[in-house]
Image (cartoon, rainbow, N blue to C red):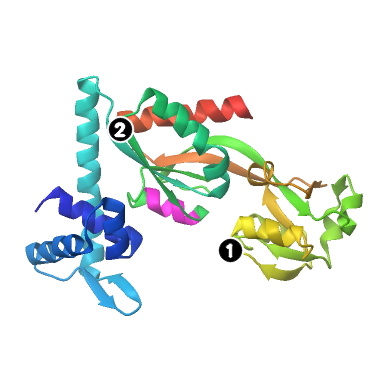
Amino acid sequence: MSLEKFEIFVKVVELKSFTKAAEFLGYTQSGVSHAINSLEKDFGFQLFIRNRTGLKLTHNGETVLIYIRDLIKSNEQLLATVSSINKVNKGKIKIGTFPSVSTNWLPSIIQNFRSDYPNIDIDLLDGEYDEIREWIKDYTVDCGFVLCDTPDDRLDVTHLLKDPQLIVLPPGHELCQYDRIPVDKLNGTNIILPKEGTDYHIGKLIEKYNLDINVSCFSTNNFTTIAMVKSDLGYSILPELFIKNLKGELVLKQLDVPFYRYLGFGVLNNRKLSPALNVFKNYVVDYVNTTK
C-alpha cells in the first residue's frame, strides 16, 4: 500500500468527486479510479458507494479514514522534522477558514509567510464554524480559525480578536437615525439572514432580548447578503472584519448592547505541532496583533 493512494483516497473524500480530486491532484480521472480500486483490492472491501447522487463512504471506509489521515499526517510531520534538522523548510499546512478571515487576514499572512518559507505549501479549506472544529479533531486540517466562545476540551485555541457584529443598512433605512441602535428597535424589522443563520450570534441575540424580527430572506453567501442590502431588501448583521472593506454605499451601525464574536486560532489539544505549523501560528498571531 502506497502513501500516494492514501492521499488520493483522502482527497476524494474531501471533494466528494473522483473528477474534482483528479483535477486538484493533477491526475487523470482514470488514474484516480485505478488508485481507489487498487486500494479496495488491498483492503479487501469497498470504500465508496457510487450512485447518481455522487459518492458516499461505506462504513468500512469511514472506519479506516481516520487511520489513513493519521498516517498521512505522521508522514508530513516526519518530513517536516527531517527538513528542520537539515535546515530546509519544507512541508504542508492545511488550514480551516471562513470568508472574513480568508478575505481580510490570510492573503497578507500567507504572503509574509511565503516570503520567508517559500517551500511550505498551504491548503485552505472553507467551512462553517462548527465544521472547522470537527476538521481539526479528525485531522482534515492541521489548524483552523474558530470561535473562542464555544469551549472544547479537545482544542487548544489562541484568542485573536474581539470582532464587533455590525448592523448593515441601506442608506435611508429607518435605523440609520441612531448613533447606536437600541436593540429593541429591531423588533418588527425585516432582516436578511446571513450565512450563519440563527445558529450562532444572531440567534443568541434574538433569544437573549426576546426579539421579534421578520426574516425577509436567507442568504447562503455573505457577498450575496451585501448585494441584497444594497438593493434595499432589508438590513443584515455581519462581523466588522468581513464588512469593513466592502461596505461601499452601505451604512454600518453598532447596537447599544455588547454584540461581538471572539475569533481564535485552533489546533488539536496536546498535539505536537510540526515546525512549519508552529512558525505559521506565530505569523498569524503577530499579524493580527499589529493590525488590530
Q: How many labels does the image show?
A: 2
The quadrant of the image that shows the C terminus is top right
Please say whether residue 134 is one of the residues in the magenta stretch.
yes
Q: Do the residues labelled 1 and 2 touch (CB within 8 Å)?
A: no
The residue closer to the viewer here, 126 or 157, is 126
* Residue type at the position of mark 1: Thr
Q: What element carries label 2?
A: loop
Magenta stretch contains residue 34: no
Where residue 45 sits: x, y (%)?
Answer: 13, 70
Residue 274, disc = 2
Other residues around mark 1 within 10 Å, as few (<14) / some (14–19) / many (≥20): few
- Judging by the rendered image, the residue that carries numbered circle 1 is 220
- Which amino acid type is shown beneath numbered disc 2? Ser
Stretch of the chain drawn in magenta:
130-136
Question: Which residue is at 52% across, 49% downward?
Answer: 98
SS type, badge 1: loop
Task: Please identify the quarter of the rendering in which residue 43 is found.
Answer: bottom left
Query: Residue 241, position in %: x, y?
Result: 64, 42
Which sits earlier in the primary sequence, circle 1 or circle 2?
Answer: 1
Q: Residue at x 81, y 56 (%)?
A: 170
Few, some or many C-alpha atoms within 10 Å of disc 2 (few <14, some 14-19, many ≥20)?
many
